[in-house]
Amino acid sequence: MADRGRTSLKERVSGLGDHVRNSQVWTSIFRPGSALRADSGDSPRNRAYVVMNNVLYHLHPVKVKRRGIKVSYTLCLGGLSFFLFILLTVTGIFLMFYYRPTSPQAYFDMQALATDVAFGQLVRNMHRWGAHVMVLTVFLHMTRVFYHGAYKPPREFNWVVGIILLLLTLLLSFTGYLLPWDQLALWAVTVGSNMGGYVPVFGRQVSFALVGGVQITADTLLRFYVLHVLFLPFIIVIFMAVHFWRVRKDGGISGPL
Amino acid sequence: MADLPEHLLKRAAEARAKAEGVPVEQVLAEMKGEAPAAAAPAAAAPAAAASQGAGRDLDADSAKFGVPRPLLERAMLARARRDGTPVPQLVGAGAPAAAAAPAASAAPAAAPKAASAGPPPGVRTQRLLTVVKANAIQGTTREPQDKVNVWPHLLAIEFVALISMLAFLTLLSALVDAPLLEFANFNQQPNPSKAPWYFLGLQEMLAYFDPMLAGVLIPGFGLAALAFIPYVDRNPSVRPSDRKLAISLYTVFFVGASILTIFGSFFRGPGFNFTFPWRDGIFFDDLLTILE
């Protein structure tokens, strides 16, 4: 009775929270649908806003076929491939801070990653195992799509884009393979790039351009490095954009059998 | 034409009533009546020409020319108004009361040229010809489907998958180190030296075939064949029971590639000669840190 007219501390704190969340600054940053807004809540409208008003989520449509998103149908393989690409980008940027693509510094930097850099070995491991897993998930994604017949009209061209993405994934992995500049890297890439020389007509020229000579040298290291960290990611991002866009334009996730 | 939206009909009637100077209700009644408003007056012109002179039996004309009677009526009135001549007397049943009213209000158009000079200022003369129902430009068929919101149904699944993969990779990376052998030495080739594991299927084929065939033609044509699958496979069905050949072929490819890769990875030792991994050990450098 005596408290009438006075605001308690709790009310003041919650009042301050509401004030901040209703402020112009706050509402300009967090668009409708964000869980951080004062007007957030579970409603069909807000569920749609969550997707529409978020730069990451709006790769997705607002609604999808219920049976198309069953885990047993997609196995999440395409999404996981994309996630692994992002993870490899993040860990790769970390590694770039500690790596010089010259001989013999490249090898010393690998040793330093294992001994001197905080979490260096862990991040390098994640980068390497993540790359292997990505080759697997991309290949399995292709297999999944084939068995579901999801390449049939109107999705023919997106299948072709997917094959290009598989090829680019292999090339990314292959160019990264040389960078540790140890015996494993050198000779695995030697074996791999020797095959390129057998390509008829222009095989030798392509091999010469990629390797930067008739055999692998320290120049090859720089070439593969640029291909690995800049050129191929640039290309693959373009094809990934087309791939995702076509998924939407061709009618979303393909229907179940 | 039959199912014009009410508001469009009303708007058209109002515009016409304003242009012709007749009550809206009358025009509306005319439009809602038996006559389709969109029929071109040009079609009725010969009929109107034929119906010059006093005493027209519009019902007879209608039967003769195959033009609906209300159209003939309208054409006749319009013609009379344009030429400034009196409206012909109608013979036969159903001479409408409506016919008199426009005739009376045709006075402003008494001068022959006045009508062709255009409508009075401020009067819109466009008329509703037809309503085309809009279709999407891209041919998406809209069938009722069982759909759910992406949030939370899909995003929750993706989040769990993503976190699981991250946890798996972190755990794996904490337990197993990536291999790092000695410094690259151009003068000392390790034995065996193997390509990265995803190329070991190809390297395995090199053991059987000419390099040109195993290293170039088979992977080259294989990749091209993969890319052309959608254009070669014309079978529209996605049911496995309808796609036995396609599924068989892909399964052969998948199993074959897997066997070759596993073989190249684990069953090839020094000199890339055949070996049993349980007898001579595994020669697979990527797993060195576990194997040791």
Image (tube, coloured by chain):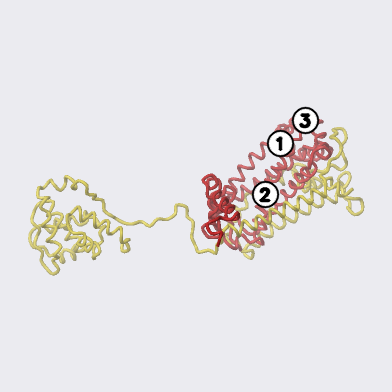
Chain colours: A red, B yellow
> Mark 3 = which residue?
A102
In terms of depth relative to the viewer, which is nearer, B191 or B107? B107
Identify the amino acid type marked 1: Gly
Asked whether the viewer can see residue A142, the reply is no
Host chain of mark 1 = A
Q: Residue at x 82, y 38 (%)?
A: A187
Q: Residue at x 22, y 47 (%)?
A: B122
Residue A235 in the image: state x and y as whole percent. 63, 40
Residue A203 circle label: 1
Q: Are the residues flagged by discs 3 and 2 in contact, CB closer than 8 Å?
A: no
Q: Tag 1, which secondary structure?
A: helix
Identify the amino acid type marked 2: Phe
Q: Residue at x 59, y 48 (%)?
A: A56
Host chain of mark 2 = A
Q: Which-is-in-front pick, marks 1 and 3?
A: 3
Q: Tag 2, which secondary structure?
A: helix
Answer few, some or many: residues within 10 Å of disc 2's Cα (few below 14, many 20 plus, some between 14 and 19).
some
Mark 1 on the same chain as mark 3 = yes
Viewport quadrant of the N terminus of chain A: bottom right
Looking at the image, tell me whether mark 1 or mark 2 is earlier in sequence order.
2
Mark 3 on the same chain as mark 2 = yes
> Mark 2 = which residue?
A83
Q: Is A90 positioned to the left or the right of B50 in the image?
A: right
Residue B109 in the image: state x and y as whole percent. 12, 50
In terms of depth relative to the viewer, which is nearer, A135 or B233? A135
Viewport quadrant of the C terminus of chain A: bottom right
Looking at the image, tell me whether mark 3 or mark 2 is earlier in sequence order.
2
Residue A242 in the image: state x and y as whole percent. 58, 46
In terms of depth relative to the viewer, which is nearer, B248 or A6? A6
Answer few, some or many: residues within 10 Å of disc 1's Cα (few below 14, many 20 plus, some between 14 and 19).
some
Answer few, some or many: residues within 10 Å of disc 3's Cα (few below 14, many 20 plus, some between 14 and 19).
some
